[in-house]
Image (cartoon, rainbow, N blue to C red):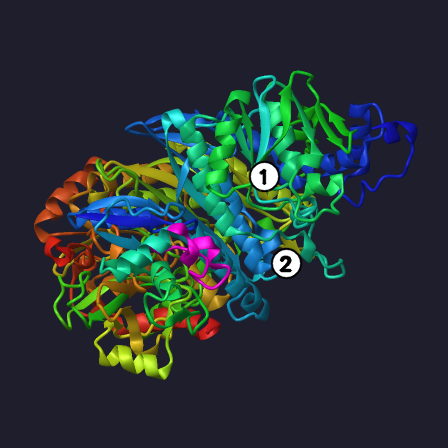
Amino acid sequence: MAVAAGDPDREQPWSELGLKADEYARIREILGRRPTGAELAMYSVMWSEHCSYKSSKVHLRQFGEIPQETPIGPMLAGIGENAGVIDIGQGYAVSFKVESHNHPSYVEPYQGAATGVGGIVRDIIAMGARPVAVVDPLRFGPLDADDTHRVLPGIVAGVGGYGNCLGLPNVGGEAVFDATYLGNPLVNAGCIGVLRHEDLHLAKASGVGNQVVLYGARTGGDGIGGVSVLASETFDADGPAKRPSVQVGDPFMEKLLIECTLELFKAGVVVGIQDLGGAGLSCATSELASAGDGGMRCELDRVPLRDSTLSPEEILMSESQERMMAVVEPADIAAFLAICAKWDVEAIVIGEVTDTGRLEITWHGETVVDVPPRTVAHDGPVYERPYARPAWQDALQADGAEKLARPTTGDELRATLLQLVASPNLCDKSWITDQYDRYVQGNTVLAQPADSGMVRVDEETHLGVSISTDCNGRFAKLDPYAGAQLALAESYRNVATGGALPLAVSDCLNFGSPEDPDVMWQFAEACRGLKDGCLELGIPVTGGNVSLYNQTGETAILPTPVVAVLGVIEDVRRRTPSSFQAADERIVLLGTSREELSGSEWAHVVHGHLGGLPPQVDLGAERDLARTLQDLVGLATSAHDLSDGGLAQALAEASMVSGIGARVSLEGDAFVGLFAESAARALVTVAADGLDELKARAAAHGVPVTELGTTGGDVLAVEGQFEVALDELRTAWSATLPAALG
Amino acid sequence: MKVGVVTFPGSLDDTDAQRAVRIGGNEAVALWHGDADLKGVDAVILPGGFSYGDYLRCGAISRFAPVMDKVVEAAHAGMPVLGICNGFQILCESHLLPGALIRNDHRRFVCRDQLLRIENASTPWTSAYTQGQEIRIVLKNGEGGFVADAETLARIEGEGQVVARYLEVNPNGSLNDIAGITNERGNVVGLMPHPEHAVEELTGSGLDGLGFFTSLVEQTFA
């Protein structure tokens, strides 16, 4: 401070830290002087795209227009908290969120993915919840590309290595391949946690004189500037090596942190709490102080270090993992430290809450930071980035897939089915999911390859929750507004097929550079689509994450607004499985099928084509379908969502997984019937004597029912067209990933 | 019967094992690694997980936990001890069982529903099964390859110390497809797959694992 005052015009490395000239000028204006090195470090990480949402904020605000309640109760914590929290009944609440760790995972696949899981889990713990499951939506370049072989095994091993070691079942996710992700894979990680209503904790530093405790791992030199350097810049082939910016994970420490933190909550010794993620101490101190009584004083010298040579700037920017910060009443400090000691977790008081309205940080007795915390944490820059419908959008939409050459004979349809089930996006994902523990905690009711993940919350009452994450980026490219709604619809539908009631949304919005007006338009349209969709379905957005600058050179990724829908089920024993359960049951299709082929897996796999308009969005029909599926709980013996690959893929999966074949007949064009990807549809089975009842219940909701055929045998047969043995189908389906990845 | 389940730092399947003990009709007692106290239990389970992160050899640090002194003492006196996955590794490190467990031959973590054959149905943990019975239970491990020198391997095969063997697929490169073994006395059993994840219809791979928790009967220790 004294140095800064005495040397007001020194050149500062604001540009290297990712700040723009006007942002640096604004910092000087706020402080009335030049910032100290430590202050500059704090502002630069907190005002980065990743932490400040400066490009996305103006569009995210509209999610606040959605009523802040779910179909069964109030939202207990929403956007702006570490993670959203919703009521699920019986005194339970659920916290859930999805976040991205895309750029670190490109640079260092294993650690990038591992720490992505670690970060989202700490967000959930910070709300007072016990983590009960994780999900992992992933996107890679083409399966046969060299760089996919570099990043995929490491990313999968990282997701598994961290989650398995924490004892969290992995119950869902996606693995999607597309050329646009080749230089920019997407690693999104989601976590669900369960808590009792009274255990909810919020991130704020209240109570003057209360102590600020840092606990968990020591602070090291890893991940310094990771936020500003990695998450907010495009990869540039000529740039310097960025490996040191990636954090290194220690899942064992995180497991101790989970148990220790839950015991601290139980003992009632926590006033406020925040995890240390992106921007580390800069973020935790400024956000806690900003949300509380407005002041905090910390002694940086007290922070336990792994590397004693770290400067105060580096300590403030370090993204070392497995750290938490808590605000504790002085009388509870002894109890707090004793619980940490029991779990071998290092803990130390580094400061206290004040009412000065300032965040003051000292180092070797000198004040190195003296700022209004709100200016760091919440009053960062906000950009109204220019956006415009891309010049190429009309031509893209005019180039529909409906005109492409189609298979016509039964043999050609059969070959198309085999080609599609073996294609990277539709094939068996066991090579990936078998590296994840899906059983730990003993509460997993549904996991891969089911449509949604489902875990039991209460062993006595059988209450459970369900989650699905979905996004078809090709649809979003064709029409980002409709694409975001289709992602929402698919996730909502997947939760409903298992028999759960969809309650709320978390999103992970992955897009290219916000400085490109085309990309910014995609982002704006997707946000608008998601908001309108949630309004119509009556479910709120509880939070989420934005990842921008996902592009390689000038090429942006497919716009990828991943939507997670969380649902509740009163009795998990009554869940509806997604594969066939018995022979001689009736197979019916719920919903309306149309000739919708643009953006489909068929167009992608067979023709390498992307153009036209995505399937029609009818959220009213989605809601009616979901209500029908809930009404069919106990009557329907299985229910499978129709999405990627259409009816053909749903039939194939439902029969391959169970080993029970099917014989169906299709009216009209068999190709369209099998491979079109119309939304708002589900494949359902019912015992023969329940068919009339099923029809009556569907009719009550106005959902069309088409009888397709009967389960049984060891072939999948389409009358008048073709038959394929389940063994042949399964061989094609399951061989793809092992053949490519070893 | 009181069955103790030890929690080490990094244990993950401890609550699952407690649940399985209860479903099996016995009383589950939580034991803490730092307490040299078995709280009067009649049998002990060392559960799965990644104790101490498995950063050193799996189980190599846990064997030095205060509670393990008591477990070793009790095992030598005949108390039934079951080590599952990480627990199996700890039993090998503690020299209560022969051999060792190394990284899977394919170098990846694997989670699957695994078919096993019960080779020894006379231990206190497997008496509910019949000799040669085939069961399907959850397997999940990164370092589950059982190895031993030729002489040891010949001995445990010859003495009937192999408790369970993998069928269909050897998921981790274990010698002789060995999934579980017992000590010479037959009271200590180590098993790489997870029977505690196969005790409820809804949440695991079926009910085939329940036998490990119903086998315990009072007269065994009278």
Residue drawn at x 64%, y 46% is: A518
Mark toward the viewer: 2 or 1: 1
Give the amino acid type for the residue marked by disc 1 in the picture. Leu
Q: Which residue is mark 2?
A: A107
Position of A44 with respect to A550 (left or right) is: right
Q: Is residue B101 above or below residue A709?
A: below
Q: Is residue A405 above or below residue A641?
A: below
Q: Would residue A135 be seen by someone viewing this image from the given angle?
A: yes
Question: Disc 2 to disc 1, how far (Cα)?
Answer: 21 Å
Q: Position of residue A741 (x, y in %)?
A: 47, 71
Q: Position of residue A666 (x, y in %)?
A: 24, 60
Specify the segment rendered in magenta.
B47-66
Label for residue A635?
none
Q: Residue B48: which quarter of the image?
A: bottom left
Q: Residue A737: which quarter of the image?
A: bottom left
Give the amino acid type for the residue marked by disc 2 in the picture. Val
The question of residue A303 being in magenta is answered with: no
Name the chain letter of the residue that bears numbered label 1.
A
Secondary structure of the residue carrying tag 2 is helix
Position of A153 with respect to A587 (left or right) is: right
Q: Position of residue A210 (x, y in %)?
A: 58, 21
Label for residue A276?
1
Name the chain letter of the residue that bears numbered label 2.
A
Residue drawn at x 57%, y 54% is: A112
Q: A380 or A312, which is in the foreground?
A: A312
Same chain under badges 2 and 1? The reply is yes
Q: Earlier in the sequence, mark 2 or mark 1?
A: 2
Residue drawn at x 23%, y 48% is: B41
